Amino acid sequence: MAIITQQKTAERPAPISETSVLGWLRINLFSSSFNTILTLVMVFIVYLTISGVLAWGYLDATFVADKRRECYDFSLTGACWAGVIAWLDNIFYGRYPREELWRVNMGGLLLILWMIPLWISRVRGKILIGVSVIMFYPFLAGYLFTGGEKSWFMQFMVTGAFLAFFVNMANMLIGLTMNTSMDKFLLRLIGQSEAPDKTQRNILLGLVVLSFVIIFSVQSSWIVDGVSWTKWGGLFLTLVISGIGIASSLPLGIFLALGRRSKLPVVRVLSTGFIEVFRSVPLITVLFMATTMFPLFMPEGFFLNKLVQVIIAVVLFNACYMAEIVRAGLQAIPKGQFEGAHTIGLGYWGTMGLIIMPQALKHMIPNIVGNIIGLLKDTTLVSIIGLFDILGMLRSISKDVPWLGLHKEPLVFGAILFFLICFSMSKYSRHLEAKLSAGNKH
């Protein structure tokens, strides 16, 4: 009897699992008559939207033309991407001299190569890699983009940048091939791996000084033609402003957050006042004030060009918002962490640098990335004060005689470009959260 019952049970069709695709559709989209009608209506609306965008942006679009009138000869309803394609160099590089574009591309390639070791698990010393990028890369890229004669300070920083880059590359190759750090490899190579710590430090310091002198003597004669900042523009200018703003505002925001929580009244009041003043006005106001008021506070004969003024304004403005994010992360840390750090003998800076701040920043990853994305998008406001960033270049297409009146296609292209950049940053932040166990891995 039991055997017959089991056979009947086996022959009965299995119910639809709630975890299967059909079960999910039935439960979430077709659970009732109203939900079924609403789902069908939304599917129809999505179909109309996608089909319309596809027809406008691809099927009826024009990709090859010399002027906007030729796009109309091909199609009256399709997009005219030919104007965007004709202006691609301007969109990405602005009015930067075309024969010098290799310098911009080289700067981007150096940054990518410099940061690749941060994503390789077998590479050691990642904190030093990140610090070297922030400290030295802006000077190397700045001279590469600007050119001209180098001052003694710029000579020193460019040499340090080259040294840090070469050490970083060598450390990456040694880590990948031998699974060790560069300092241990060098000490083992010269037979000093068993020497006292002080002797090892002196040897490594001597190698660094010797390498610095050699690189300084070689690069001191390296000079590239000067390019005025007024020729910078497009996505290149947007990434320069936002990149410096991101790299500078986070450490400045950390110090402002610590200053706002300080027990010293003067430091706390100054930090709080600085934060509240900049957070109480919109960015466009800060930009206008920077370009008009900064020169009044500078010593006589000291001049800052508009690009430097804008970068300073962006850094100060974003640092105040970053300070509030960091302060929220610090407040989320239990007091037991502070007490435990003091118990093992750590001072204030040791407690903050080794125990508290890493946890606070880990918890605030979504907020920090959201602020960074907002900063990237807010840099388009610089077009209002006369800088031709990517938005300024996109708007200039419609004023070019062959493409007069071409508004929609450039702005749509810019929106797609910003979406790709911001979406990539958002996805990486989710990956970083999961890797650091700071968010929901599911």
Image (tube, rainbow, N blue to C red):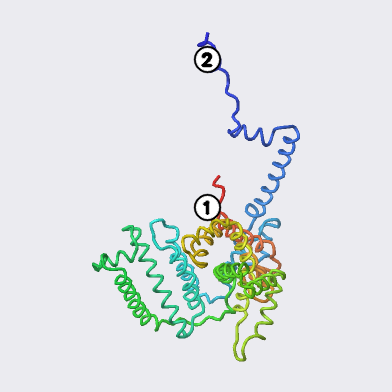
Q: Which mark is residue 251?
A: none
Disc 2 residue crowd, few under 14, some 14–19, many 20+, Cα 10 Å: few
Query: What residue occupies the far front of the structure in this picture?
Result: 343
Q: Between 335 and 297, which is closer to the camera in this rendering?
A: 335
* Mark 1: amino acid: His
Name the quadrant containing residue 175.
bottom left
One can see residue 264 in this view: yes
* SS state under label 1: helix
Query: What residue occupies the far bottom of the structure in this picture?
Result: 300
Residue 212 lies left or right of residue 409; in this view the side is left
* Mark 2: amino acid: Gln
Label located before the other in sequence (2 or 1): 2
Q: Relative to 333, is 318 above or below? A: below
**Residue located 49% across and 52% down the image:** 435
Q: Position of residue 359 (x, y in %)?
A: 53, 58
Q: Relative to 290, is 26 above or below? A: above
Name the quadrant containing residue 36.
top right
Residue 432 lies left or right of residue 166; in this view the side is right
**Residue located 67% across and 54% down the image:** 56
Q: Position of residue 268 (x, y in %)?
A: 64, 71
Q: Between 219 and 48, which is closer to the camera in this rendering?
A: 219
Query: What residue occupies the far left of the structure in this picture?
Result: 191
Q: Position of residue 424 (x, y in %)?
A: 56, 56
- Whether residues under marks 2 and 1 lie with C-beta atoms below 8 angstroms apart, the answer is no
Residue 196 lies left or right of residue 136; in this view the side is left
**Residue located 70% across and 56% down the image:** 77
Q: Which mark is residue 431?
A: 1
Q: Quadrant of the C terminus?
A: top right
Disc 1 residue crowd, few under 14, some 14–19, many 20+, Cα 10 Å: some
Q: From the image, tell me which residue sits under label 2.
A: 6
